[in-house]
């Protein structure tokens, strides 16, 4: 299957000037008149590095991959959109298990693709053989694997994903937004396959959702195509700076992950004590079913926000793993609500 669109293949990438200079008068930039301290250090009057070079170097060290195999941008959300922009023609099919991260479907609609969701099995287990069969029949342009899956927390193992890659020529996008809370990243296989893209983010395990840093790891051919459709200065200097700093102190993130795993276990065990269906999770959230309808609204009355999936899956909810105090408050409020129902 020819993956890349002809109009994209022929684009000459916009190349910002990266030559050394004594006086810079090439890009119609202004002077730094605000924030004299950080403004000078971060060169706030100049356009950011369009390639996010330093940031990609640090990501490269973190993942043990060549920075040339990385594109960085505004969250993994931008990365999902760039994949569609580069590869999706009107009417193409996009395949994924459901329930999953809703943006795959939303971007499919925006890019006039047809989104097809395969139901997960009982307990939200995803059967790779069913996915492979479906892909053979409907020949999707892109298959999205959210791993671990949001909202169910289900994790496909590497061997299953490799089996999929060995049995399809569709583009396989593995969204690893939550992989730091699990194991089994596909990053190490990016050069082995022509059709593998891995998406990652600093929004979850690094706790930096506000700076909107996400990135894609893939083979050089795909990275070159993505760079053609990416806008020239997609990631601002402040985010690049903060991202670099965080990656240089990544030990903190490893500690934080251990904390979240401990709290996830606590929350899971507490939820199990209630008449609630709880699903094991590999992310920083837990998916559950309670027969209490509008549980999210009842919790909200007590000042606690959780996510309801009742629009598609009645009485299913997702709670983020918080710190011990937040988790205790959530459990306490849940207990009050459940007792009130009886
Ligand atoms: N992928 C998944 C599976 C997510 O859950 C999210 C955020 N909820 C994203 C991607 C987007 O994250 P960001 O744009 O902050 O990197």
Image: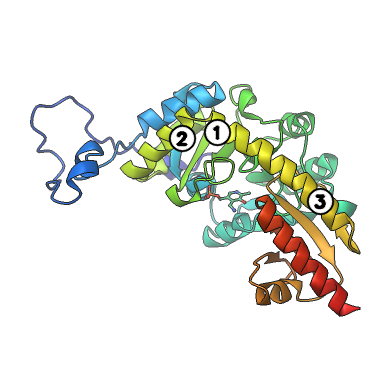
Quadrant of residue 175 within the rendered picture:
top right
Q: CA distance from mark 2 to mark 1?
A: 9 Å
Mark 1 Cβ and ligand 1 under 8 Å apart: no
Q: Earlier in the sequence, mark 2 or mark 3?
A: 2
Image: 115 above or below 228? below
Quadrant of residue 306 within the rendered picture:
bottom right
User: CB under 8 Å between callouts 3 and 1?
Assistant: no
Q: Residue at x 75, y 76 (%)?
A: 294
Q: Residue at x 68, y 64 (%)?
A: 307
Disc 1, SS: helix
Report the residue marked by disc 1. Answer: 252
User: CB under 8 Å between callouts 2 and 1?
Assistant: yes
Q: Please name which of the two marks, 2 or 1, marks the residue nearer to the observer.
A: 1
User: CB under 8 Å between callouts 2 and 3?
Assistant: no
- Residue 52 location, x and y as percent? 37, 34
Q: Residue at x 50, y 50 (%)?
A: 209
- Residue 202 location, x and y as percent? 52, 41
Q: CA distance from mark 3 to mark 1?
A: 24 Å
The residue lying toward the viewer, choosing from 271 and 195, is: 271
Pick the quarter of the image with the C terminus.
bottom right
Disc 3, SS: helix
Report the residue marked by disc 3. Answer: 268
- Residue 58 location, x and y as percent? 45, 27
Disc 2, SS: helix
Report the residue marked by disc 2. Answer: 246
- Residue 269 location, x and y as percent? 85, 50
The residue lying toward the viewer, choosing from 12 and 100, is: 100
Q: Earlier in the sequence, mark 2 or mark 1?
A: 2
The way the protein has been coloured in the rendering is rainbow
Q: Earlier in the sequence, mark 3 or mark 1?
A: 1
Is residue 116 visible to us here? no
């Amino acid at each position: 299957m020819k993956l890349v669109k002809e109009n994209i293949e022929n684009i000459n990438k916009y190349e910002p000037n990266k030559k050394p200079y004594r006086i810079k008068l090439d890009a119609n930039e202004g002077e730094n008149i605000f924030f004299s301290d950080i403004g000078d250090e971060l060169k706030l009057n100049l356009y950011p590095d369009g390639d996010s070079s330093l940031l990609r170097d640090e990501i490269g060290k973190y993942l043990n991959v060549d920075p040339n195999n990385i594109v960085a941008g505004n969250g993994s959300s931008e990365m999902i959109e760039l994949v569609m922009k580069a590869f999706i023609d009107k009417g193409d099919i996009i395949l994924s298990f459901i329930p999953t991260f809703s943006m795959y479907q939303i971007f499919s609609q925006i890019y006039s693709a047809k989104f097809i969701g395969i139901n997960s099995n009982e307990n939200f287990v995803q059967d790779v053989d069913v996915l492979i069969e479906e892909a053979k029949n409907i020949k999707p342009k892109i298959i999205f694997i959210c791993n671990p899956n949001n909202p169910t927390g289900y994790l496909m193992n590497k061997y299953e994903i490799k089996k999929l890659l060995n049995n399809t020529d569709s583009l396989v996008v593995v969204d690893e937004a939550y992989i730091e809370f699990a194991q089994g990243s596909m990053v190490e296989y990016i050069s082995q396959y022509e059709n593998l893209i891995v998406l990652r983010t600093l929004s979850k395990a690094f706790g930096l959702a506000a700076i909107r840093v996400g990135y894609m790891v893939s083979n050089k051919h795909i990275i070159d195509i993505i760079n053609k459709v990416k806008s020239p200065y997609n990631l601002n200097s402040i985010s690049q700076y903060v991202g670099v700093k965080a990656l240089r102190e990544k030990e903190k993130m490893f500690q934080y992950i251990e904390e979240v795993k401990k709290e996830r276990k606590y929350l899971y065990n507490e939820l199990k004590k209630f008449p609630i269906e709880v699903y094991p999770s590999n992310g920083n959230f837990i998916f559950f079913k309670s027969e209490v309808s509008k549980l999210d609204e009842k919790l909200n009355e007590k000042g606690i926000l959780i996510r309801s999936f009742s629009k598609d899956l009645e009485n299913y909810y997702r709670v983020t793993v918080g710190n011990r105090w937040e988790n205790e408050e959530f459990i306490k409020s849940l207990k009050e609500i459940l007792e009130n129902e009886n």
